[in-house]
Amino acid sequence: MSPSPLTSRSSGPSLLTFLTRRRSVLWRTRVTGTWATSGRTTGPGLPWAGDLTQDIFNAVIKEHPGLVQRLPCVWNVQLSDHTLAERCYSEASDLKVIHWNSPKKLRVKNKHVEFFRNFYLTFLEYDGNLLRRELFVCPSQPPPGAEQLQQALAQLDEEDPCFEFRQQQLTVHRVHVTFLPHEPPPPRPHDVTLVAQLSMDRLQMLEALCRHWPGPMSLALYLTDAEAQQFLHFVEASPVLAARQDVAYHVVYREGPLYPVNQLRNVALAQALTPYVFLSDIDFLPAYSLYDYLRASIEQLGLGSRRKAALVVPAFETLRYRFSFPHSKVELLALLDAGTLYTFRYHEWPRGHAPTDYARWREAQAPYRVQWAANYEPYVVVPRDCPRYDPRFVGFGWNKVAHIVELDAQARQARQPLLLCPTLQEYELLVLPEAFTIHLPHAPSLDISRFRSSPTYRDCLQALKDEFHQDLSRHHGAAALKYLPALQQPQSPARG
C-alpha cells in the first residue's frame, strides 16, 4: 500500500485533486503562513524531511486536509522491497500507476517483477516520436506555429528530388536540454565554452575531449530514445565523464533521414552560458593548453562590445589512429615536418582552410588578420551572441561555410558608412599564433557517402546554396554580390 502522504517523500497521485483545487484557495498566503508556523514539522512528532517541496505539500495537507481526496491504492503502487504493495492488488492488470522509486530499480523483489521489468525496459526502447502522432485523440490546443508548419509540409512535393532536404528542414525535433545534471560555470568575463554536436557513433570521443578541454562544454547529441538510455549508462560507467559537471549534454531526438547538423549546433550554442564560444566539431581534439590560451587572448586583445573578432584556431589532421599528441606548437611543427600531421583537408579540400595561411602561422608570434575567401570554414572563437547557423543545411556540405559567410557579411555591413552605427563592429578574422586543434580519423558518415556517390544529393545542396544567397541578398543588399561566385562553384565529390 502507499504510505501516508505525511510520511512519504513522494507526493503521489493524491495531489491530482490537490493541484486542481489549489487555484480556489489563497495559495501563496496559506503556504507562506503554514510553512512559517509549521516549525518544520510535517506531522505529529515527524521531523523535517529535508525535501523542501515535499515538506511544503505535507504542511499544507496537514493544515487543510479537505484539499485532498483519497484515491484507491492501485493509483500509486510503490515498487520496493519494503512496501506492502502486494496487499493492494491481486493481478498486475488491476494497476493504474506504478511508482518505481526504489534506488534498486530493476532489482526490486516482487511477485510480478518480470512483468514490471519487461514493461519498463520496453518503454525505454519506445520511439518517443510515436507519442507525437495522433494515436489517441485527445482534445488539446495546437502549439504556436503548428498550423503554419502543417501548411508548409502540405505544400511539399514528394516527387521533388530534394524532398528529403525540404522535409528535414521543417522537422521540429524533440529536445531535452541539460539531459544530465549540470553545474553552470561561475561568471567570468573572458570564459569560453566549447560547442559541438555528435551522434552515437562518436561517443568514444567524449573522454579524450574532456581530458583536452578542462573548461565548460555544451554538446548536442542526436539520438533515438533507446540510444539516449545507452548514452546515460555510458556516462555513468565512465569516471572521466561522470566527474565533469560542467559539461552540458542536450539530447535532440532523431527524426528524419538526414543529419540536422546546423540545428544541433544551434541547440548547443543557445545553451552556452559563457561570454564566448569555441565552435568546434566532436572529432577534433584541441591543444591541451587551448582553453587557458583562448581566455588570455580574449583579454589581451581587448575584445568586447566595441571590438568583435572571430579568433581562428588553425586546424590540422592525422591519418593515424594512434599518435603522440603534441603539447606545444614546436612539437606540432615537428610532427608536421615528419608527415605525421597535415593541415586539415590539405589533400581533399585545401580551399576550406587555405586562407588561414599556415606558412605565416609557422613563424607568427602575434595574432594576424586574414580575409574571407570562397569556401573558407575555419574553427573560430566568437561571442555567444554571434549569428546562428543556417538550419536549411542538413546532411553534409556547406553548413560551416555558410556560417562564416554570415560572419563576414555582418562585417561588411558594419563597414557601410550609411549605417551610422558607432557601436556595431565587424567580425575581424584573427588567427591565433599558438592555438591549434587536431582532427582524428574515423569512418565516413552516411551523409558524406551519399554526397560523394549521389549527383542528386549534390544538386540539392546547390539548390540550398542558391536559396541561401537569395536570403543573403535580402538581408545585406548589394554586399551579398561578393559571395555569388563562391555559391556558384560546384562541389567536388572527392570532398570529405
Image: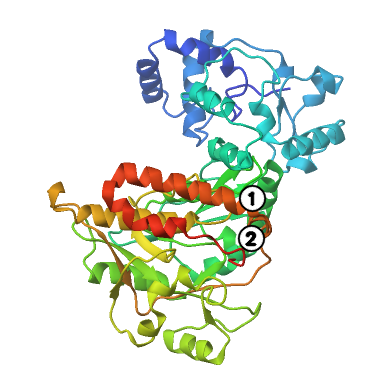
Q: Residue at x 24, y 63 (%)?
A: 303
Crowding near the residue tagged with mark 2, few <14, some 14–19, many ≥20 C-alpha atoms within 10 Å:
few
Please give the residue where the numbered disc 2 appears in the rendered image. Answer: 202
**Position of the C terminus by quadrant:** bottom right
In the rendered image, residue 24, in percent from the top left (x then y), is placed at: 43, 7
Disc 1 from disc 2: Cα separation: 27 Å
Q: Secondary structure at mark 2?
A: helix
In the rendered image, residue 491, in percent from the top left (x then y), is placed at: 54, 61
Q: Nearer the viewer, residue 481 or 358?
A: 481
Q: Nearer the viewer, residue 386 or 358?
A: 358
Q: Secondary structure at mark 1?
A: helix
Q: Residue at x 62, y 51 (%)?
A: 457
Q: Is residue 108 left or right of residue 133?
A: right
| Visible residue check, residue 246 | no
Question: Above or below — where is 227 with respect to 318?
Answer: above
Question: Above or below — where is 186 with respect to 223?
Answer: below
In the rendered image, residue 243, in percent from the top left (x then y), is placed at: 55, 61
Question: Above or below — where is 21 with respect to 148?
Answer: above
Of the residues under marks 1 and 2, which one precedes in the sequence?
2
Q: Is residue 106 left or right of residue 424?
A: right
Quarter holding residue 411: bottom left
Crowding near the residue tagged with mark 1, few <14, some 14–19, many ≥20 C-alpha atoms within 10 Å:
few
Q: Amino acid at mark 2?
A: Arg
**Position of the N terminus by quadrant:** top right
In the rendered image, residue 325, in percent from the top left (x then y), is placed at: 55, 81
Q: Nearer the viewer, residue 433 or 23?
A: 433
Please give the residue where the numbered disc 1 appears in the rendered image. Answer: 456
Quarter holding residue 368: bottom left
Tell me how many marks there are: 2
Q: Amino acid at mark 1?
A: Thr
